[in-house]
Image (cartoon, helix red, strand yellow):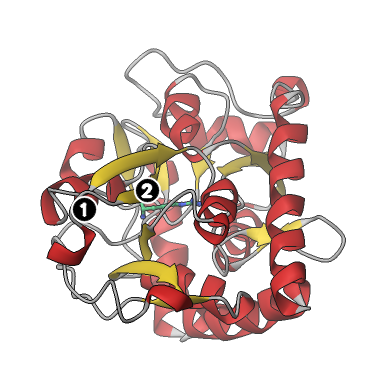
Amino acid sequence: MKKFLGLLFAVGTLTLLSACATSTDKTSSSSATNNTSANNDDKLAQIKEAGVLVMGTSPDFPPFEFPDANGDVVGIDVDIANAVAEELGVELKVMQLSFDNLLPSLQAGKIDVALAGVSATEERQKSADFSTPYFTPTQKIVIQKANADTYTSVDSLDGKKVGAQKGSIQEGVAESQLPKASLVSIPSNATMLIQLKSGGLDAMVMEGAVAENYVAQNADLVVADIDLTSADDESYAVALPKNSGDLKTEIDKVIEQLIADKKIDEFVTKNTELSDQSAD
Ligand code: ARG
């Protein structure tokens, strides 16, 4: 039953993602403006003027972002964005995009911020600003429980199909740490999950908290006993348009306060419970 519901959860996520494909351009009423110019100094003023903060996210990443029982996007990142919106005195609007479209949408001015467990890598810092980091992930491999005794080392995955989310740092983790595996890039984690469960993939690379979450909801999956290493620049941060000036200052202030008040830890606990319920 749990297996079936886990799948249902995944399919629900898929439906949401495809539904959003047709509704991504509802920016007219929002503050997101074209920011092809390098100077986004007035970004904060624009958001306040519009009264709306537009957050882009890819809700296939529980407990950071996922659909709740009503199909609304909730999660740690939504809680953080709500704290930011509250501080700015504006309303939060969540726009659902595929992960690989988040940074391009930020650059195109379709969204004001991207909160999606986005790792503030050196490479990405060339095209976006990032807030103070708020969470440090680990890298894990998820496999079918039936294969737990087969996939026990990096070498055991040689020639096997290993999934990673398109545009995510997991593509790089797979390429550099599982060099003899065959990498399959998949836009949505929900699709990747279905493929792993059905045997279309042998393994998938995911971040620890998300891997644990999916495994808790899918009794047929386990986190493999294979160690992967992390780079220094994988921590999650809010992505902002380049040169966001005052907006970055305000967001950093909120995040530092949330960390100091142990609020992020609370968000993690609350949303981990919530995502288990959504899947039950
Ligand atoms: N931290 C990884 C990255 O930035 C994966 C993030 C995936 N997030 C998501 N909402 N699917 O590449």
Q: Can you identify the residue that label 2 sits on?
A: 164
Looking at the picture, tell me which residue is in the foreground, 190 or 51.
Answer: 190
Q: Quadrant of residue 24?
A: top right
- Residue that mark 1 sits on: 173
Which of the two labelled residues, at mark 2 and mark 1, occupies the earlier sequence position? 2
The N terminus sits in image quarter: bottom right
The answer to the question of whether label 2 and label 1 lie on touching residues, with beta carbons closer than 8 A, is yes
Please state which amino acid type lies under the numbered disc 1.
Val
Left/right placement of residue 210 relative to residue 132 reads right
Judge: label 1 CB < 8 Å from ligand 1: no
Residue nearer the viewer, 118 or 174: 174
Q: Residue at x 50, y 41 (%)?
A: 113
Position of residue 145 relative to residue 198, above or below, is below
Count residues near mark 1 (Cα–Cα under 10 Å), then give few for <14, some for 14-19, many for 20+. many
In-image side of 171 versus 25 (left or right) = left
- Could you classify mark 2 by the number of other residues whose Cα lies within 10 Å: few (under 14), some (14-19), or many (20 or more)? many
Q: CA distance from mark 2 to mark 1?
A: 9 Å
Residue 190 spot, x, y in % from top left: 59, 52
Residue 266: quadrant of the picture: bottom right
At numbered mark 1, what does the secondary structure look like: helix, strand or loop?
helix
Query: Depth check: 220 or 208 in front?
Result: 220
Q: Is residue 120 left or right of residue 249?
A: left
68 versus 166 height, above or below: below
Which image quarter is the C terminus in?
Answer: bottom right
Check disc 2 and give the amino acid type: Ala
Residue 150 in percent (x, y) is at 29, 74
